[in-house]
Amino acid sequence: MERKSVTPITLALVIPCFNEEDVLPETIKRLTLILDELVKYKNIHSDSKIIFVDDGSRDKTWGIIEEANIFNKYVQGLKLARNAGHQNALLAGLNYAKDFSDCVISIDADLQDDLAVIPKFIEEFNNGNDIVYGVRRGRSTDTFFKRTTAQGFYKLMNSMGVNIIYNHADYRLMSKRVLEHLGEFKEVNLFLRGLIPLIGYKSTEVYYDRNERFAGESKYPLKKMLAFAFDGITSFSVTPIRLISAIGFLMFLFSFFMAIYILINKFLGHTSSGWSSLMISIWFIGGIQLVALGFIGEYIGKIYREVKARPKYFIEKSTLNLPDQRNKEIKELVGTTN
């Protein structure tokens, strides 16, 4: 069912940032051109915004956002008091944007996601889709290792019963009512790629080619990627615990047959002391026990964090409530001093 509206929709772009001073000026420039074009053809309302969320950056990221807020009518900013993580920073922007927008598009600041498909997102929203997933056509720009591990992660998640979109990260459009339902999830361990499909509503996919990073360095090294993947698995599936139970049962069966084998050899007089086999057995069983305890500990740790229900982030500064009159005064002052 298509959405018919007399007035253009109000769009918000939410962009989490962490130490993005090298790429941010170009990101602002390109996104501004996109919004200007959409406003010109009345696809979106002129009150649409670009919301940058500074996730505790240590460089000039926040200064760039503040300056852009003065001269660019679209740019708004939130500065978190500390690095809360990509998912929490994204959630902070989404929570603000839902109060004034008809739909929100989340996107990373590195310009790897293709901005040219944003009009297609809006078109699909107007066609009645509450969620539009940006999906990569391929991974030709990735290294062999990253491509292999990423594809393996999606397949592993799906095999464990977690409903996530293959080759989709956090480039997506969500309607206002989807964002309102997202706010009903109170869990601390956020994995938005898994949460969004749980909400339901009509959805579709828009395919695009991912670009090379425009500038700066990736904020997701191998260590963070592994931690993110492990968070996703343990937040949405108890399959690892069940696998441990299955391994334990198989080990019990194996030990039962080994006991029969040893007793038969004892009665036949073929027994001999075997240091090697004893050591291998001890190390093997001990390793399984430690892995099992690690998995169980991970789930207990998540329960511990959820029970505490600590705030996901704190906002230190914001340009969101800076009155238009104050913006005007700042612009006049800057113009005078120049």
Image: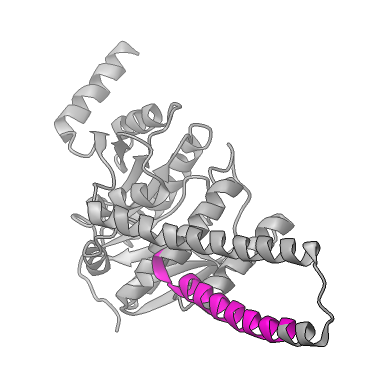
Q: Main secondary structure of the magenta part?
A: helix
Q: Residue 153 location in percent, x, y?
A: 58, 66
Q: Which of 264 and 330 lies nearest the eye of the viewer? A: 264
- Name above or below for residue 269 compared with residue 150: below
Is residue 92 rendered magenta in the image?
A: no
Q: Is residue 261 left or right of residue 194?
A: right
User: Quadrant of the rendered structure where residue 288 is?
Assistant: bottom right
Q: How many marks?
A: 0
Q: Which of 334 and 310 lies nearest the eye of the viewer? A: 310
Quadrant for the N terminus in the image: bottom left
> Magenta region: which residues?
235-262
> Residue at position x 62%, y 68% from top?
152
Q: Is residue 84 left or right of residue 48?
A: right
- Name above or below for residue 99 compared with residue 203: above
Residue 188 visible within the image:
yes
Q: Is residue 176 left or right of residue 136?
A: left
Residue 172 visible within the image:
no
> Residue at position x 69%, y 81% from top?
258
Quadrant for the C terminus in the image: top left
Q: Residue 15 location in percent, x, y?
A: 39, 47
> Residue at position x 31%, y 43% from top?
74
User: Quadrant of the rendered structure where residue 76 is?
Assistant: top left
> Residue at position x 27%, y 68% from top?
178
Q: Residue 124 location in percent, x, y?
A: 39, 73
How is the rendered protein coloured?
A: one colour
Q: Which of 315 and 276 lies nearest the eye of the viewer? A: 276
